[in-house]
Image (tube, helix red, strand yellow):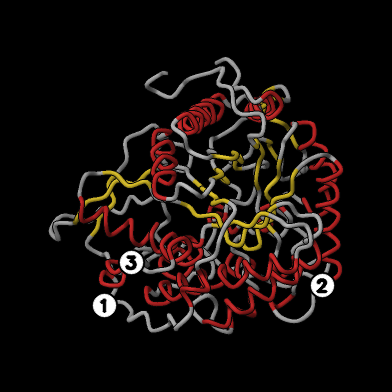
Amino acid sequence: MSSDYRDSGLVFPPHFIVGSATAAYQIEGAARDGGRTESIWDTFSHTPEMTWNGDTGDAADDHYYRFESDLDLMAELGLDAYRFSISWPRVQPGGHGPVNPEGVSFYSRLVDGLLSRGIRPIATLYHWDLPQELEDAGGWPVRDTALRFAEYAELAATALGDRVHTWTTLNEPWCSAYLGYGSGAHAPGRTDGAAALAAVHHLNLAHGLAVPRLRAAASNLPEVSATLNFHVIRGGDAEATRRIDALANRAFTSPMLLGRYDDDLIADTGEVTDWSFVREGDLESIHQSLDFLGVNYYSTVTVKMWDGVTERSKNDGHKDMGGSPWPGSPDVEFLEQPGPYTAMDWNIAPDGLYELLVDLGSHFPDLPLMITENGAAFDDEVTDGRVHDPERVDYLNRHFTAAHRAIARGVDLRGYLVWSLLDNFEWGYGYSKRFGIVRVDYDTQERIVKDSGLWVSEVAKNKVTPPL
């Protein structure tokens, strides 16, 4: 084994799932077509100075109209699975009432197209596109949004639950709560720590209320999961590590997997909120049996307690929009990480993925894991009709090596979904960051499979990482 995680020729189990992932607002486009209404990301991206260059997801990758050719591309790559998200305002405009037949038809054709090509559909119900009407009524900080989400989940499962293999309730609720309501870096762009913590709970509650309704409405006994973006914390400062672990990780794993909020989280945030939004029976509702846990990983963070004198370092990997994604911990600082870095200025640390998988496997030994996002943005160039992206190939090789080593340690890791299938609208960064293993020309919508896409294809088809 190489010390830098640059192994090759690694053999994965035959059943190991290798696929890719996307999100609705980032790729679909057709923002005002087919009965879709506005989401918080439509509003946010159309607000001046909220996104790079004023970019929006209005057109994105035009996947809504090009999905058949995109499915053909997935089949050519030999992907085992495709994780996509369902646009809530496309399926249930406004977040209430009956389904929109045109929206359901789109996802039904997408699922049928995946199945006909032998690709497993993994549907994420919420990847950040809350209907704007629900935000106008208070958004995730209010309890009613969780109740509306459970109804939406049942509608989606009733429409597609005879064919979707796997349902994921939420994608990265950390981002939805803390970046959306605490720091202001994501939609809806609010900067209120108390609202962020209320959003944490109501997102957890939405997950818990949705799981039994998904299982009841679906007719094919699907797998049900949630996807969390874990913070791998370094630095050696025990108090800073404990605080950020509570906010970033245990605020979700403890209620979802253990049925509790940890006492230290409540104490740390006591000056921000009294947690009175947690009602009797909520934690029992949140604590649901899952078929696997989705793991999103990109980089690590390094923290220490701030001395209160020097300038506080805020290198947490997220845009500074005036608020804080760390309510109750203003005395923790985030140090600059050692390189190398991706185009997002995120450090490249495959050992962090290995440590995370082993840690989760140790704490939750009976819960299978799946890497539902991992990938990297780099500044790609087209040369003679090709995209040679050796940095991304190296990144993926090193992280697949980390996954292989975790499996060798006994971690029950079921699959690896690369982020992302296509270059796309990268939220507040607009179209300035390219994560895709397939390049998209945003003027012509031409797709070009990058070298990284060919590398992933080899792994998907052969279950062996190619020679370096």
In the depicted view, which residue is nearer to us: 95 or 281?
Answer: 281
Report whether 104 appears left or right of 335. Answer: right
Q: Secondary structure at mark 1?
A: loop
**Amino acid on which the number 3 mark rests in the picture:** Asp
Which part of the image, by quadrant, shows the N terminus?
top left
Q: Which comes sooner in the sequence, label 3 or label 1?
A: 3
Give the mark, 2 or 3, whose residue is nearer the N terminus. Answer: 2
Q: Residue at (74%, 73%) from the top-left corner?
A: 92
How many numbered discs?
3
Q: Which mark is residue 262?
A: 3
Q: CA distance from mark 2 to mark 1?
A: 43 Å
Callout 2: SS: loop
Q: Around disc 2, counting alpha carbons within 10 Å, would you say few (fewer than 14), some (14 to 19), or many (20 or more)?
A: some
> Which residue is disc 1 drawn over?
271
Instruction: Give amino acid for label 2.
Output: Asn
Q: In the figure, 182 relative to 345: above or below?
A: below
Tell me, for residue 100, which label it has, or none.
2
Q: Residue 463: horizontal and vertical position, in percent?
A: 65, 26
Q: CA distance from mark 2 to mark 3?
A: 40 Å
In the picture, which quadrant includes the C terminus?
top right
Task: Give amino acid for label 1.
Answer: Glu
Image depth: mark 2 or mark 3 in front: 3
In contact (CB < 8 Å): disc 2 and disc 1:
no
Q: Nearer the viewer, residue 194 or 315?
A: 194
Label 3 Cα crowd, 10 Å radius (few <14 / some 14-19 / many 20+): some
